[in-house]
Amino acid sequence: MLSEKSIIKGCEKNDKRAQKLLYEKYAATLLGIAMRYAHSKDEAEDILQDAFCKILMKIKQYKGSGSFEGWMKRIIVNTAITNYKKNLKHYYHSDVSEISDSFVKQDQFGDHEFQMSELLNVINALPEGYKMVFNLYAIEGYKHREIAEMLGIEESTSKSQFSRARRLVQTELEKIAGTKKIFLKIENE
């Protein structure tokens, strides 16, 4: 097995074996990121394909400073944002004017742990703009100013969409936690 540095060097020389090894090593991680931004697995796979092509075309631009995986993650996030902007007119937009402004306490879930699939389903069910901002802020760690620049929106819009997204996520997680408590009670009786 080649080292990461050797794989990168091979990819710089268009070595098909190195490209295959790079894909095999990182495809699952990068697809997981794409899934957070896509409507479906097919769309996520398209994002992955586009991003991987960009990674291979730009691999010589990677200077070795910082994490190579982090460099690739930034490319896939940017590719997902481009995909989002390109398809924005096709996405269904929910009317969010009726979202409750109630504050959800941080400790309300107690010891309940959520499965990754549950969290992913809740995030993917968010309206598109909310999902994009939520992923960029809460998961990728971008600042609202950066998100606003990336998406071509106002910083206050980013903050507002994140706040509403967070409330929707918390509400859905409350429902899941409540349902699981009922099932656990029934099983223990």
Image: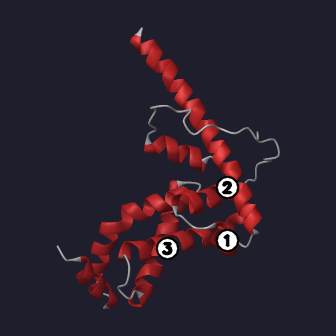
| Residue named by callout 1 | 145
Q: Quadrant of the N terminus?
A: bottom left
**Amino acid bearing label 1:** Arg
> Which residue is located at x 59 percent, y 30 percent?
175
**Amino acid type of the residue that numbered disc 3 sits on in the rendered structure:** Arg
Q: Position of residue 130 (x, y in %)?
A: 68, 55
Q: Circle 2 — which element?
A: helix
Q: Report the front residue among 186 and 110.
A: 110
Q: Quadrant of the C terminus?
A: top left
Marks 2 and 3 close (CB-CB < 8 Å): no
The amino acid beneath tag 2 is Phe
- Between label 3 and label 1, give the one nearer the viewer: 1
Residue at image location 76% in from the left, 63% down from the top: 156
In the image, which is nearer the foreground, mark 2 or mark 3? 2
Mark yes or no: residue 34 visible: yes
Of mark 2 and mark 1, the one earlier in the sequence is 1
Give the residue at mark 2: 162
Label at residue 74 = 3
Residue at 43%, 77% (x, y): give it. 71
Judged from this view, the residue extending furthest toward the top is: 189
Which mark is drawn over residue 35?
Answer: none
Q: In terms of secondary structure, where does tag 3 sit?
A: helix
Q: Residue at x 40, y 12 (%)?
A: 188
Q: How is the image coloured?
A: secondary structure
- Residue 16 in percent (x, y) is at 29, 82
Nearest to N terminus: mark 2 or mark 3: 3
| Mark 1 element type | helix
What is the spatial separation of the Cα atoms under label 2 and label 3, in whole angstroms?
Answer: 20 Å
